[in-house]
Image: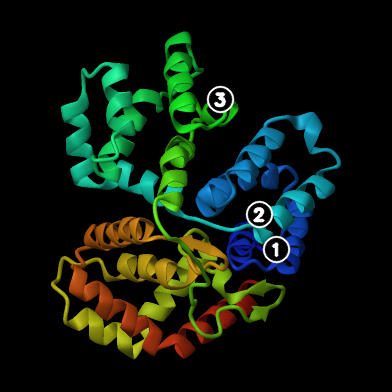
Amino acid sequence: MNSWVLSSAVQKLIRRSNIEGALECALRLERINPGYMRRRLPVIAYEDIGAGNESYCLRVTQRASRAFDWEPPETAVAEAVAALAGSLKSRTCCDFACLLEFDPACRAFKVTLQGRSEDELLALALDKEASWLDRACALELMCAKRGRPNAQMLAALSKVSEAFQLSMEGCVLFVGHKSDDRLMPLTLPLAMEVSRVEQRQIVDSAGLPGSDAWVNGVPLCALDMHSSMGRKMLKVFCRSSSEIRRFARDCRPEVDVASAVSLALFHLDSGHMKQQIVTSASEELRERYETMELARCGINAAQRIQLYAAITADVDRLNEVRESMIWQEA
């Protein structure tokens, strides 16, 4: 099986709290691509666990950063996967990071913050009268630098650590991380506050019917836009779904329907999580993120709801295409 599909399966199954399935796919992937899970699991921890259990995020990240502490690999992978799948979950770190990266309002606000001192930025980050995203922008400008942490950056992080009552180790671990995931750890203090700010609920979000079915050793939900097999599947689905074709006919010519379907499917199905912490603040961030992503494809808020309904209405066709694609690539 394609290693990218197995990686997707591991993450989807962790989200669904399917410990046994996640372990099966993770160990298969470790045998196919040794060392990959050591690099991937910290990202999954921040994307999907985050404020649900910040100590797990720090523990997985710290252990993965030490090669000698990842032996034997299969035991380390199994322990980390089981812990993440069994944990409470939150995608607020990921929502914050995506909004900081792509939301036009966040980009514009960060321009206005240029030149502010670290003390001024920290004061804004701690200001509970300010919006969540304004506070996140201030944190990013304080801490999100590429390269190795220097004395000035460590001093700023020390202030964040003390102010948010987060370990210094937790603040430092991902500073200087060279991938686009570097923003998630920096938003962890705010994500933790979002999860505590009011009465919270632990909910199980609903995925699409049939998406948890397994075919040839992977769940159907593993096919998404992040693998070549998933992209092929999405093209076939867009061409063959009467509901998607009907939706496309009603759209303006400049709308990127294929990309919109890819993103909508992620939000409807791939983002399905069990044991998820939900507050009104986290839901507002999620809603803003989803609306922003679809808007980048030319889809407005009303059309987003219509697109979700079109995919849901033709879910049987979607699952048929997924199953067919898995057998073709076997």
Between 199 and 169, the one lying in front of the other is 199
Residue under pointer 3? 168
Question: What residue is drawn where x is 51% and y is 31%?
Answer: 165
Residue 86 % position (x, y): 68, 60
Number of the label disc, if any, that sits on residue 84: 2
Secondary structure beneath label 3: helix
For the residue pair 311 and 115, the one nearer the viewer reads as 115
Q: Identify the residue at horizontal 43%, vertical 78% (top origin).
A: 236
Q: Nearer the viewer, mark 3 or mark 2?
A: 3
Q: Taking 250 as reference, is 258 left or right? A: right
Name the amino acid type tagged 2: Leu
Between the C-alphas of marks 1 and 3, the distance is 31 Å
What number is the disc on residue 22? 1
State the quadrant of the C terminus.
Answer: bottom right
* Left or right of 107 in this view: 52: right
Residue at (39% x, 55% y) in the render: 198
Residue 133, quarter of the rendered image = top left
Q: Decide: marks 1, 3 in contact (CB < 8 A)?
A: no
Mark 1 or mark 2: whose residue is earlier in sequence? 1
Q: Which residue in the rendered view is the most extreme toward the right? A: 72
Query: Percent position (x, y) of residue 6?
Result: 65, 61
1 and 2 marks in contact (CB < 8 Å)? yes
